[in-house]
Amino acid sequence: MKDVLDRFEEVAENPQTCAFEWKKETGRPVVGTFCSYAPEEIIYAAGALPYRMLGTGGAKGYSDAYLQSYCCSVVKNTLDDLLSGELDFLDGAVFPHTCDSVQRLSDIFRLNMKNSFHLDAVLPAKLDTPSAAHYMKSVLERLAGDLEERLDTRVTKQDLTDAVLVFNRIRNGLRTLADAGMDNRINITAGELHTISRGVTAMDPAEAADLLDRLCTFIQPKAEPGSGPSKRIGLTGSVCGVPSVYETIEQAGGRVVLDDFCTTERYTDFAVDESADPLPAIAARYLKKADCPCKHSSLYSRGERIVEKAEKRGVKGVIFLLLKFCDPHAFDYPYIRDMLELKGIKSMVFELDDEQSVHAQFRTRCEAFMEML
Amino acid sequence: MATPDEKKIKADKRLREIMTEYYIEAKTPKEQTGKKIAWITSGGPVEPLHAMDVIPIYPENYGAMCGAAKMSTELCEKAEEMGYSSDLCSYARGDIASAAVNGGPIGGLPEPDMLICCNNICGTVLKWYQVLARYFDVPLFVLDTPVCHTGYEKETDIYVRHQIGEYVAFLEAVCGRSFDYDRMDEVGTLSVKAQKLWQKVLDTTVNKPAPMTCFDAFFHLAMIVTLRGTQTAVDYYELLLEEMNDRICKGISKVEPERYRLIWDNLPVWYKMRWFSDKFGAHNAGFVADTYTSGWCGTLPYLDENDFLGSMAESYTRIFLNTGIDHMADNIVKMVEKYDADGVVFHSNRSCKPYSFGQYDIQRIVGEKTGTPCLMIEADMCDERKFSETQVETRIDAFIEML
Amino acid sequence: MITAGIDIGSTTAKGAILKDGHIEAVTVMSTGYDPKGAAETVFQTLLEKAGLDRKDLEAVVSTGYGRKNVGFAGRSVTEITCHAAGARLLSPTAATIVDIGGQDSKVIVLDSTGKVADFTMNDKCAAGTGRFLEVMASALQIDLASLAEFSARADATVAISSVCTVFAESEVISLISKGEKRENIIAGIHAAIGSRIVSMAGRVKARPPYIMTGGVALNRGVVRVLEERFQSDVTVPELAQVNGAVGAALIAADRNG
Ligand code: SF4
Ligand code: SF4
């Protein structure tokens, strides 16, 4: 098991190097993407490695000449990576529609990328109407066509079906592991799960699927007894690249049993229908997967999902990790907090300045929160 | 030199009257007016509401009023108490709080019967209207207008057109009667008329000296936002246009002598309008145009007077905030040429990310293409706590020295 | 039973020894740059004051920002929980504790049994903390301790609109150069802190009776602003500064008892 975990960690820690090596070995293109709504299946079907740009951090400062100080660190760090030349290995980038900041990031990328193509996949913001569903499908068809042109290739139905199978395996594997980890049926911490999910974003999908399958063989049928006195904690909020929060929560006496971040729960939710025509099936998945606050479906969908999962997993308290200047999540926080409160689930909100570095106060707050529960 | 009295724009008075009447009607109990109320985003399609005799209410217009009355900061603080981050758009924070405590100069807006949200200006409005829909528990219609980064695609047109149909059906359901297509044609014609007049009003500042500044335009904008599609708006802008032409004949301007002609980008700083106008005025600099007020007539080329409903999809989707930043930069370049401007002032607005992010690239493009000096000022349109007078003052002085 | 609580804050280190629920000794000193050393000194002073020896103590709990630096403590508990515990002894009726220290400020809401029901802390920004007052005092070139005195003489409150400490500092400087009275500016500074705290309090549904602890509680000007904004009395307990340390000592006893 250790070698598999090590491999995920290696990629999670050096995503750029790993993607670049993949490119050298296979001679195939790498396409950068943003957000859990990027239709990776299509990019992979077009023969490229979908590489999720999450920003490596380190406040390189290049982006300060392009973006104001009141921009979230995910966007700033990603632009830093581009401007510092670290993303020069990309053959192109695909930006799906998400929040306002990413719309502008996409424009800035388009104007400042060198020698690589740029595509917008302006997905619908609304997910709950037939016209939006139809539009979703058309946008994906256009994207497939654009990719064919840019990568000088053909995307056949078979390519799409193959890609769907691989990504279904990945998401299914991640989900199975997460469930098992949280029920104590496998010796994997929430922090390790997070690392795995980060590794998946920059790895050959086929390799990722195989590794996940291997990990799943270690799952025990029954839960290990005695998880100790730890308090069961749920995590939600903006996309999160800070494994150290898991450690801090554990040291404070908490156990993460619900992880609703963008690279975990919101990424793995819902499989593509393998028996249907692949492109419409892919479109259908992006309409139905756990929604992110940039999208509009029902008014309470996110709150309901989080409350339901929290109750199912016996969560005592929920920690909202909000990234500073992330508007979509900041708008959703008060109502979800209230919904949890109605169910007697306490919550705490913590604002992160930069995903990559957690302020010392977080420790104190976590400890106080555990003491309160 | 014109006297202070001559410098005043006479139509101001009429505008105040109309806006007062408008808010009085809106605040009159519904049993008396028999009209339903819709809250709608500033870039939203208001014409079908007028066609259905629904009173449109613009929280953003009210946000501007609160800001100008320096009442926003308090409301923003209230929203923060409710759990909303202080980094969110101050219109949204102010409105969410005002709904809860009936705040602001007219003691809160009349409660809505429906909510109309069009995301052609930002994603913030989508979140904001979701909050409102939960709070008031009334039907919400979302008009989803995909961003046109590089162009207007066919599938976008199909999608938005389809939604215009859904919008009509939504109104029929909420109002309980069928849509009046004949009325819609009339309203559409009036809307196009008002937009053309507004464009003409804005064009008068091509004249040297300009008969008004953008600070006047920010004020006179109220009508094109809230009442386009009505005869009132058409009449008003005819009056205003006449007055502007008269001022041109008489050579009256706000800034005398007008030494520098500037362009303003982004929303105004509502609580500091006077201050900015005086500050620049003292250097004989006047703002002859801005990117904000022209936003309400910028899509005229896509509108078809004879098929308003049919052309709504394209015209509402292609408003400048919903395009790529290179397109936004070109818009400014054209303005610099058209108005023969000497400089561009960018308001980097902490509230409005879609309008502000990209300004550095825009500044670069404008500088390269026109050679005009640019100034970036950081503030917030309503939240006074985000404004540092001393810092901004120094920058303005240095900028003027550069011109 | 005899227990001790050691509270290592960013500016001051505090300690308390309790014997069967009664306070035997308390002490306050500056933390300086050596939290470990400060903890040791506080402990020694306490023992001397109480006339006790180390081995007389059955348990020691550390708290505060430097709580992990207290090697001799059996365990550490956050200042939030300790403040709640301290209030149970020192101000048993309190429902809300406003604690404004040097680097951070907190609002702690207690349930009917005196346990923490909810809490919040300032974000990274220093507005609403003792640090904010320090910066402003130095911009005005007056002693931190005399801020309250000055604000008491104010005949108006000058609005300080900026929330960021750096902005507010330049705002204050420009107000001085405009000839505003220092008294009135200080009243404005206190009002600005008040706004921050009230907004934090709103987020956790704070309710009266209020008590205030932490170094800034010594500034009557801030307390008065909070009373106005909360429209309620805000009591500063006599032992406000050692409230957290007392709480830690109580918690130490609870574990054993
Ligand atoms: S963290 Fe929030 S603001 Fe930043 S890119 Fe993600 S959704 Fe957008
Ligand atoms: S100011 Fe900007 S963010 Fe706020 S509602 Fe208007 S467009 Fe949206």
Image (cartoon, coloured by chain):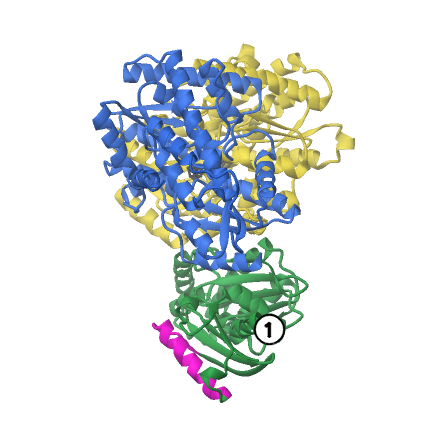
What colour denotes chain C?
Answer: green
Q: Magenta stretch mostly in which secondary structure?
A: helix
From this viewpoint, which residue is outermost toward the front? A221
Q: Where is residue A52 in the image (x, y as percent from the top left)?
A: 35, 32
Image quarter (top left, top right, bottom left or bottom right) of the C terminus of chain A: bottom right
Image quarter (top left, top right, bottom left or bottom right) of the N terminus of chain A: top left
Tell me, yes or no, whether the highlighted magenta stretch contains residue B56.
no
- Vertical position of residue C109 compared to residue A233: above or below: below
Chain letter of the residue beneath label 1 in the structure image: C
From this viewpoint, which residue is outermost toward the top? B306
Label 1 element class: loop
User: What residue span does the magenta drawing correspond to?
Assistant: C29-50
A327 sits to left or right of B368: right
A333 sits to left or right of A27: right
What colour denotes chain A?
Answer: blue
Tell me, yes or no, whether the highlighted magenta stretch contains residue C45.
yes
From this viewpoint, which residue is outermost toward the right? B31
In the depicted view, which residue is nearer to us: A163 or C56?
C56
**Residue A229 quadrant:** bottom right
Q: Position of residue C200 (x, y in %)?
A: 55, 56
Circle 1 crowding by C-alpha within 10 Å: few under 14, some 14–19, many from 20: few
Q: Is residue A219 visible?
A: yes
Chain (yellow): B
* Residue bearing the label numbered 1: C257
The residue located at (30%, 45%) in the rendering is B399
- Amino acid at circle 1: Gly
In the depicted view, which residue is nearer to us: B377 or A326?
A326
